[in-house]
Image (cartoon, rainbow, N blue to C red):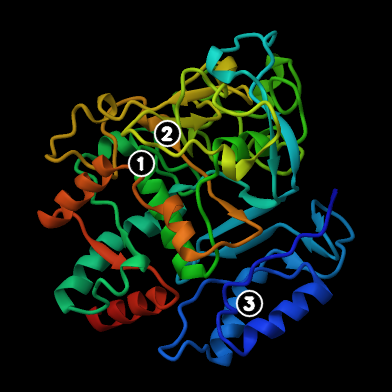
Amino acid sequence: MSSLAPHTLSSLCARTSWFAPLLALLLVALAPVAAVADDAPAADGTKSADEKQACQKAAQLGITDTKPESGHFVQVGDKYMIPYTTKIPGTEVEYTMMPIPGGEFLIGSPEGEAKRSKDEGPQRTIVLEPFWMAKFEVTWGEYKEYMKLYEVFKMFELEQIRQVTDDNQADAITAPTQLYDPSYTYGVGEDPQQPAVTMTQYAAKQYTKWISGITGRQYRLPSEAEWEYACRAGSKTAYHFGDDASKLSDYAWFDDNADGRPGKVGKKKPNAWGLHDMHGNVWEWVLDQYHEKGYSRLSEEPTKAVDAVSWPDVFYPRVLRGGSWDDKADRSRSAAKFESDDESWRETDPNLPLSPWWYSDDPATSIGFRIMRPLKMVDKKEMAKYWQPAVEDVQDEVDLRLIGGRGVQGLSDKDLPAAIKKLKAEKE
């Protein structure tokens, strides 16, 4: 259990002239309050009562006024962040989010840690706001719901419904193209409870934009600092359970026990904050660009996590964290990292331009991701940097695929699940 100083949460639903002053008073009197979703207002700038209620309901998931009698929770002022399990709208597929307390920690590893790499230092102090982190990596059960959108969006294009325009481009996502060689991607398994693998960072980011749009909540990839903080769960040792690598089999799928493939999520012991598979199973995408000199770019003074992100300015490498089923124990340490090599990981891709959604070469079968959700919501324009291609090279690949008809865009909003259901009913 963790107790935090009160936090005032932004309310993006309150963008109307009559509601904003009232909300300001409520925030002063009742802080903190739950953030609410960034739904678009009506043409006159107002929102209906139903829209406001849905907006508030979506954002309040995981927040309660009552102190839980047991289990993991995070106190924020007079409210409590709690774990929550919910379904992907329009499906029976569930995912679980765990509350992570705010605080500070030293990112990286001390110089004396065994098997340490130079890119894990120098250690720097990072200050974090509370957030939720997915209990497990994104599974095939979850990711295949996103993959289904390729055919759905193609059908929307054919029927000329829910078209992407300049006015609604902010809600547009791309769906990953169909696998040209499933035997590679599914070569290590496609069980619904196995982590999904071989997706690019761009595809993982678009997944988070999709699930944000249909739920009304803001999901994204964690930053490198957020990921390590969540992994450590208050620990300062090589692993979140201590320094003894002989105990890793209790917590992780890795080279010694994985039998040549990732394991089903949640079969190993969690860390102190209830997160499974933070060590091993699959490397997990984070937002940051990779730097050989580690954290020397950061100030020796404490840095806010949002300011510590190394936003990419080159095509690659990007950072992955956590180790994998195909790695030795030391690669699963809390501070260990892996840099992407997008060219070699797509070397046998027969497509031109190369796919911005899928990798075709090892070690891509050990690459996956998990999602996080900040407690404080931000403006949709600010969220765009968490979802969109970070550099022009990636955007160019996407645009060329769209122009050539080998990619597809669609709108991800609260109406998408119902539109898919209607389309299916009409085709049956």
User: Comparing marks 2 and 3, which lies closer to the viewer?
Assistant: 3
Name the residue that disc number 3 marks: 56
- Residue 352 vs residue 263, the one in the foreground: 352
Mark 1 vs 2: CB contact within 8 A? yes
Q: Earlier in the sequence, mark 3 or mark 1?
A: 3
CA gap between label 1 and label 2 equals 7 Å
- Residue 109 vs residue 246, the one in the foreground: 109
CA gap between label 3 and label 1 equals 32 Å
Figure quadrant of residue 344 = top left
Q: Residues within 10 Å of mark 3 (few under 14, many from 20)?
A: many
Q: In this rendering, is residue 422 above or below 370? A: below
Asked whether residue 143 appears in the rendered view, the answer is: no
The residue positioned 50% from the left and 18% from the top of the image is 293
Question: Which residue type carries mark 2?
Answer: Ile
Could you tell me residue 37's position as x and y percent? 56, 71
Asked whether residue 56 appears in the rendered view, the answer is: yes
The residue positioned 31% from the left and 34% from the top of the image is 315
Could you tell me residue 127's position as x and y percent? 70, 40
Quadrant where the C terminus sits is bottom left
Name the residue that disc number 2 marks: 367
Question: Which residue type carries mark 3?
Answer: Gln
- Residue 213 marker: none
Could you tell me residue 174's position as x and y percent? 29, 57
Q: In this rendering, is residue 423 above or below 10? A: below
Could you tell me residue 282's position as x and y percent? 49, 32
User: Comparing marks 3 and 1, which lies closer to the viewer?
Assistant: 3
Secondary element under disc 2, as helix, strand or loop, is: strand
Q: Is residue 43 left or right of residue 356?
A: right
Secondary element under disc 1, as helix, strand or loop, is: loop
Question: Which residue type carries mark 1?
Answer: Met
Secondary element under disc 3, as helix, strand or loop, is: helix
Name the residue that disc number 1 marks: 199
